[in-house]
Amino acid sequence: MEAHDHSKITSFYSDSVRVMGKGYRSVYTKAAYKDWVEWDGFFEPTYEILSLTESDNYVEAQIRKSDPRILFLNGEPFITTERLNFVDGKLQSLEILEEQYNEARWIETRELLVNWITENHPELEGFIFDQTLEGAENYGHAIKLYEVRRK
């Protein structure tokens, strides 16, 4: 797992990007959204567009996403239906309309990982909340340590 240069992607964002989904709503500045994209990119995700609908101001897509973190937590890729809204050709908001994943497994696995790291590698504590590139590196390291322990 390695980071990629996402510095050019911010030209596609509005001044801020709203992200909405099941039970949450966040507003990111360009810099904060870039940090999240870098965090996500560290895990080298692959995306498969299953369906795509375009309109003048938005794109609605069903996407299958997979990466080592998702496979660790969910056991298989997850699928989302997303609506990306654009103003003047720039991303203004991303709304998660539907998520298909094993929520119970995700939560249980995440809790096992967090608890094990807290007990055995307190220097990594808090990795789960740090959505910066350093946080992604710590998350990846935590997964590797946990998986080595299980072997």
Image (spheres, grey):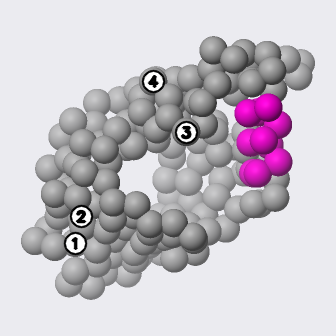
In the rendered image, which residue does mark 4 sit on? 134
Residue marked by disc 3:
129
Q: Is residue 140 above or below residue 15?
A: above
Mark 2 in CB contact with mark 1 (< 8 angstroms): yes
Q: How many residues crowd around disc 4 within 10 Å: few (fewer than 14), some, or many (20 or more)?
A: some
Q: Distance of mark 2 from mark 1, alpha carbons?
A: 5 Å
SS at badge 3 = helix
Q: Amino acid at mark 3?
A: Phe
Contact between marks 3 and 2 (CB within 8 A): the answer is no
Q: Nearer the viewer, mark 1 or mark 3?
A: 3
Residue placed at 24% from the left, 67% from the top? Answer: 92
Which residue is drawn at the image coordinates 27% and 85% (left, top)? 55
Determine whether the residue tagged by mark 4 lies in a helix, strand or loop: helix
Magenta residues (range): 106-115
Picture quarter containing residue 143?
top right
Of mark 4 and mark 1, the one earlier in the sequence is 1
Residue 149, position in %: x, y?
Answer: 85, 17
Check disc 2 and give the amino acid type. Leu
